[in-house]
């Protein structure tokens, strides 16, 4: 049952991320820069979580000083990195190209856990990974050269997003063994917030004189693309292995393609729908198998 909750939570995260990808492209078309959207959404998410637990349950704010480097590594190179590089790639290329390259991440994670964490790569996991990657290829229409656009720079940004997402998934999983869902998220968001405050200082933001409408956009994108989905994803990491979690997250491209079709007037063919079914099939295969030998103890 706990594993099922993990799959459900990560699927919910992927759904929100897919919606957020289309929204990001929509806002970029209205002259919002990737940096400010990435910075404001994680900063607002951190402030909301920190203040909430400051007044309701301060035990969630307790952490060990020796774990600061771990929070900084995962928060900066994992969370902040994946957020920025993915949004920057979307602006430089398009949603389809960015997704195709970023979702080489499941392969990276699976290779890492097999080589360095001695995690068994079962036939079910391997089949699920192949199905999910193939499904993404079909769902975004990558078989059509006209769909895949962008410069080498944009593709490079998407590849960096894949590496960063892998770091977050692997490093975040390690933190779930030490801290509750909320403690982990608060300080991962906090690490990313501190990092961005050096890149784009608070004074710079004040001097930009953003309007009330701008702040409404920042808060909305923060809730939809950071606070809610990362809460779901991190909760899911408490319940299932990182290699499974990142495969389930490939549901994001399916949602992104469908939402782009509905919101931005994109196309959706039968082959793309077939790709979506491949991704869903991969998730079903994982959910039906369990090779975790030890029970997962969850602090919620």
Image (cartoon, helix red, strand yellow):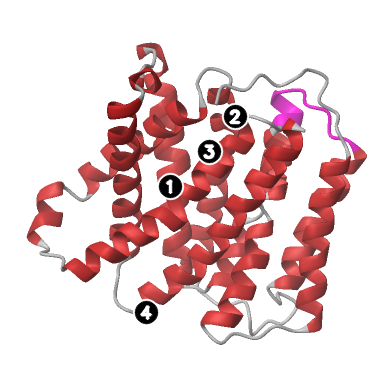
Magenta range:
113-122
Left or right side of 132 for 163: left
Q: Position of residue 165 (x, y in %)?
A: 55, 45
Check residue 119 for magenta coloring.
yes
Q: Which residue in the structure is indicated by mark 2?
A: 173
Q: Which mark is residue 86?
A: none
N-terminal of the pair, mark 3 or mark 2, is 3
Q: Which residue in the structure is indicated by mark 3?
A: 168
Q: Which residue in the structure is indicated by mark 1?
A: 227
Secondary structure type for disc 1:
helix
Q: Position of residue 131 (x, y in %)?
A: 83, 57
Q: Which residue in the structure is indicated by mark 4?
A: 29
- 123 and 230: which one is in front? 230
From the image, give the main secondary structure of the stretch colored magenta.
loop
N-terminal of the pair, mark 4 or mark 3, is 4
The quadrant of the rendering that contains the N terminus is top right
Counting other residues with Cα less than 10 Å from the Cα at mark 4, is it few (<14), some (14-19), or many (20 or more)?
A: few
Residue at image position (79%, 69%) is 275
C-beta proximity under 8 Å, tags 3 and 2: no
**Looking at the image, which residue sits at the far front?**
56
Check residue 294 for magenta coloring.
no
Residue at image position (30%, 48%) is 44
């Amino acid at each position: 049952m706990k594993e099922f909750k993990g799959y459900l939570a990560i699927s919910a995260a992927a759904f929100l991320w897919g919606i957020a990808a289309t929204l990001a492209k929509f806002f970029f078309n209205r002259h919002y820069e990737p940096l400010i959207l990435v910075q404001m959404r994680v900063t607002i998410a951190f402030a909301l979580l920190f203040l909430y637990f400051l007044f309701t349950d301060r035990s969630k704010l307790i952490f060990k000083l020796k774990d600061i480097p771990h929070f900084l590594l995962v928060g900066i190179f994992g969370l902040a990195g994946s957020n920025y590089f993915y949004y920057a790639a979307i602006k430089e290329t398009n949603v389809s190209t960015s997704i195709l390259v970023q979702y080489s991440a499941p392969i990276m994670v699976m290779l890492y856990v097999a080589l360095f964490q001695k995690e068994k790569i079962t036939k079910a996991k391997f089949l699920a990974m192949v199905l999910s990657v193939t499904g993404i290829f079909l769902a975004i229409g990558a078989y059509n050269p006209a769909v895949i656009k962008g410069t080498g720079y944009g593709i490079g940004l998407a590849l960096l997003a894949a590496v960063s997402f892998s770091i977050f998934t692997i490093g975040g999983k390690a933190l779930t063994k030490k801290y509750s869902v909320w403690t982990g998220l608060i300080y991962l968001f906090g690490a990313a917030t501190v990092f961005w405050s050096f890149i784009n200082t608070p004074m710079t933001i004040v001097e930009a004189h953003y309007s009330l409408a701008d702040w409404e956009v920042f808060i909305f994108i923060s809730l939809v693309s950071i606070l809610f989905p990362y809460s779901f994803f991190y909760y899911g990491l408490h319940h299932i292995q990182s290699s499974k979690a990142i495969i389930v997250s490939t549901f994001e491209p399916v949602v992104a393609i469908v939402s782009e079709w509905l919101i931005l007037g994109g196309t959706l063919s039968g082959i793309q729908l077939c790709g979506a079914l491949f991704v869903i099939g991969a998730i079903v295969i994982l959910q039906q198998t369990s090779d975790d030998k030890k029970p997962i103890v969850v602090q919620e």
